[in-house]
Image: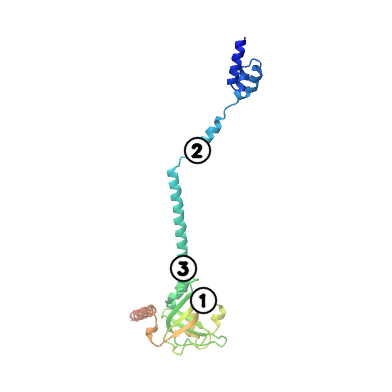
Amino acid sequence: MAARSSTLRLISSLLPKTSINLLSPHHHHHHYHHISPLRHRPFPFSAFSTAASRRQPKKLDIGARARQLQTRRLWTYALTFSGVAGFVILVLNNFQDQLVFYVTPSEALDKFHSNPSRNKFRLGGLVLEGSVHQPASSPDMEFVITDLMTDILVRYQGSLPDLFREGHSVVVEGFVKHFSDEIKEIGAGGKSKEVTAKARSGDCYFSATEVLAKHDEKYMPGEVAAAIEKNKKKLDEEAEAKKTAAV
């Protein structure tokens, strides 16, 4: 018995206190009750699995990434092209608004009827003889420009150039406008009534802002001169055809 006690004391001196209590028969039940929660506590494996999943790199879908970049690039190109195209259209429209074309009375009326918003022209032709006059009730001068096929009434507020002559070429700059009843009636009487009757029978007149005139026929723009010459030949052919038919 004494040997056993000495052996236990020797073991208790070598082992930790907790081990001694576990081996002690007097405290056996007490310490098992104390350490039982440690024995049955679950190990947190889920924490390790979550941390491991965080450390694992995500697998990249190279094809989807490439398609996304391509779509983004296409949208960039489309937006850039749309912006440039819109800017070019605005510049061209503004430039076209500033352009003034040399036209005959026939061409001016055709263009105006096709697109009434574009009504600014440089009108070239011949001043119809007997058409120049100033109505008593108006500050505007009136005369008729013809290309031998179409007559158009021109109204101009201001002094006519010194070289302005009936039967000679002239270029006027201004706008084609619709007749009002008042303008049609003004100047419809007097000596110019018969001369301007054809021009007043239409639905438009020309409101001039500038009148240019020279006695040199070369002053007339080439396209206007060519159109008048073409109309003159056409009228001569028609007159010859009528003479032949009459015979």
**Which residue is found at the position 62% from the left and 13% from the top?**
5
Q: Residues within 10 Å of mark 3 (few under 14, many from 20)?
A: few
Question: The disc labelled 3 sits on which kind of residue?
Answer: Val
Which one is earlier in the sequence, the residue at label 1 or at label 3?
3
Q: Is residue 202 visible?
A: no
Q: Distance of mark 1 from mark 2, alpha carbons?
A: 81 Å
- Along the line of sight, the residue nearer the viewer: 32 or 123: 32
Which residue is at a point 60% across and 15% down the rendered structure image? 8
Q: Is residue 46 visible?
A: yes
Nearer to us of marks 3 and 2 is 2
* Position of residue 245 in the picture relative to residue 193 (left or right): left
In this rendering, is residue 161 above or below 69?
Answer: below
Q: Secondary structure at mark 2?
A: helix
204 sits to left or right of 234: right
The percent position of residue 100, horizontal first and vertical second, equals 45, 76
Task: Give the distance between the C-alpha atoms of the residues marked 1 and 3, in whole angstroms.
Answer: 26 Å
Disc number lying in front (1 or 3): 3
| Label 3 or label 2, whichever comes before in sequence order | 2
Q: Nearer the viewer, residue 89 or 205?
A: 89
195 above or below 85? below
Given the image, on which type of amino acid does mark 1 rest? Lys
Residue type for callout 2: Arg
Return the mark for residue 54. Answer: none
Near mark 2 (Cα within 10 A), the count class, few <14, some 14-19 or many ≥20, is few
Where residue 186 appears, as percent x and y from the top left, is 55, 83
- For label 3, the residue is 91
Residue, far top: 1
Q: Which mark is residue 55?
A: 2
Given residues 41 and 217, the one toward you in this image is: 41
Label disc, if present, on residue 177 of the rendered structure: 1
At mark 1, the secondary structure is strand
Task: State the residue in front, 131 or 162.
Answer: 162
